[in-house]
Amino acid sequence: MYDALDQLANEDPEAFADVVLAMATNDNPLLREQAALSVLTLIQNNLPVAARTAALLCNDKDDDVSTRAHNQLWEISQDSEHWSSERSIAFLRALDQASQVISGEQPETVDLEWTDPRAIQSAIDGLGKFGDHLTDFAYNIAKIVGDAATYPHLFTEDMFAFLMNHSSAVVRSSLVNILANNEDLLRTHRSFAIKAWQKLLVDPHPDTRGWAADLFYEQLFYDGQRCSVFESEYQEIIATLPSEVRKSIAIS
């Protein structure tokens, strides 16, 4: 069946999209699983239908189908040759909107530039709904938000508060990357950057908390020596940390 679908995708992409969507809504769970395997091919020629198919299958009542769909999304996110920042944001926004339709909500239909803060936040919400394993999508978004030179309008406290308080641990981890790669935020957004580090270092998710500890240590030390020019800011962050957290980042 997969070979036949692949041939159809090459010969008639529109018909292929119709067939995959029909499979995704079929009563037979085996057909729905097969539809999950076709999402990557579908993305290449019909992103809205791909998003709708993925949203349906990730929310499937059959655990085998939903697991297959989530695993497929993870595999897709790891194949970086298919994903520019623009494309990943477009796909995650479409996932978010499709998920809202499935749940009976009315999604925002305004056409937004992919670098619009609302488009970024919509994409992040789409990511959060589909699991913490879609790390490459998060990385693409973090690169945009974290690129002060190209997208300075995204460096707002509203955006960083949105990232810091997001329900997805991988989204919060992306903020760790932004803070670590843009140390000057401790000058330009001093109070917020300090607050963000303080919160991320005690994050409830062990992966985010551990990642924050690792990168925070790298900010402080080089070859075992304190090296940061933001010593007073880091001292302010450290002062609020529980003793066990200070120990975890080798700070007495």
Image: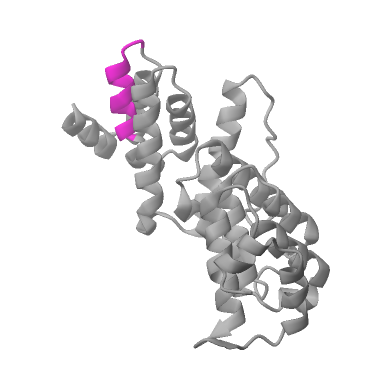
Against 90, residue 94 (above or below) is above
- Residue 76 image point, x, y percent: 37, 46
Q: Could one spot residue 44 in this view of the protein?
A: no
Left or right for 156, reference 225: right
Q: Quick check: is 104 in the magenta stretch?
A: no
Residue 152, above or below 98: below
Give the residue displayed 76% in from the left and 64% down from the top.
Answer: 240
- Give the image location of residue 74, x and y in percent: 39, 44
Percent x, y of residue 160: 72, 58
Chief secondary structure of the magenta portion: helix
- Picture residue at 61% right of the left edge, 53% below the top: 172
Residue at the location (68% across, 68% down)? 151
Quadrant placement of the C terminus: bottom right
User: Observer-nearest residue: 181 or 118?
Assistant: 181
Relative depth, front residue between 51 and 247: 247
> In what quadrant of the picture does the N terminus appear?
top left
Q: Image quarter for residue 175? A: bottom right
User: Which quarter of the picture shows residue 198?
Assistant: bottom right
Q: Is residue 154 above or below residue 76?
A: below
- Image coordinates of residue 164 in percent, x first then y, are 69, 53
Q: Is residue 73 left or right of residue 90?
A: left
Residue 37 in the magenta stretch? The answer is yes
- Quarter of the image for residue 125 reads top right
Span of residues in magenta: 27-38
* Residue 172 visible (yes or no): yes
